[in-house]
Amino acid sequence: MVIATVRDEVNRHLPQGFVEGMGHGMIVWSVPLARYPDTYNQQPLDYLALAAQKNNYALYLTCVYMNRDQEMLLRAAYADVGLKIDMGKSCLRFKSLAKLPLAAIGPIVAAWSVDDFTAMYEQSRGSSC
């Protein structure tokens, strides 16, 4: 139920152009190679990923990792509902839906178009946009 609920929330807010698939043993939303083939590893450019792990669930938010403003919005959403954030560079860990401010995930997912995300990726790689 947790994975299905978070997946539905992501899909409700996912901008056009990103595609859902499986990769790295988890659900991945990415920019398809047909749209953006110039990746460092010749794999689709991952935007988000969702996994059920041994001790928790994980939502990988590349857009938060690559943008400090998005990270601050996510941290503020946790503080607003009185939750402690458990996050690595892009990995947001949670043990249940009660430990995830789901209402904050939709706007973060919706914040980047494919073009904006690929431009941010190019900038992070030192390429010109």
Image (cartoon, rainbow, N blue to C red):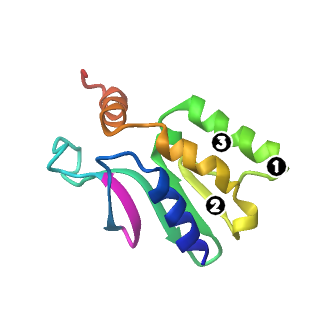
Residue type, numbered disc 3: Leu
- Say which of 57 and 103 sits in front: 103
Question: What SS does tag 3 mark?
Answer: helix
The outermost residue toward the front is 12
Classify 10 Å Cα crowding around label 1: few (below 14), some (14-19), many (20 and above): few
Classify 10 Å Cα crowding around label 2: few (below 14), some (14-19), many (20 and above): many
The outermost residue toward the right is 82
Considering the image in quadrants, where does the N terminus appear? bottom right
- Say which of 66 and 81 sits in front: 81
Cα distance in 3D space between marks 3 and 1: 11 Å
Residue beneath label 2, please?
93
* Discs 3, 1 touching: Cβ within 8 Å: no
Label 2 or label 1, whichever comes before in sequence order: 1
Indicate the position of residue 11 as horizontal and vertical percent values: 45, 58
Residue beneath label 1, please?
81
> Residue visible at 38% across and 61% down?
28
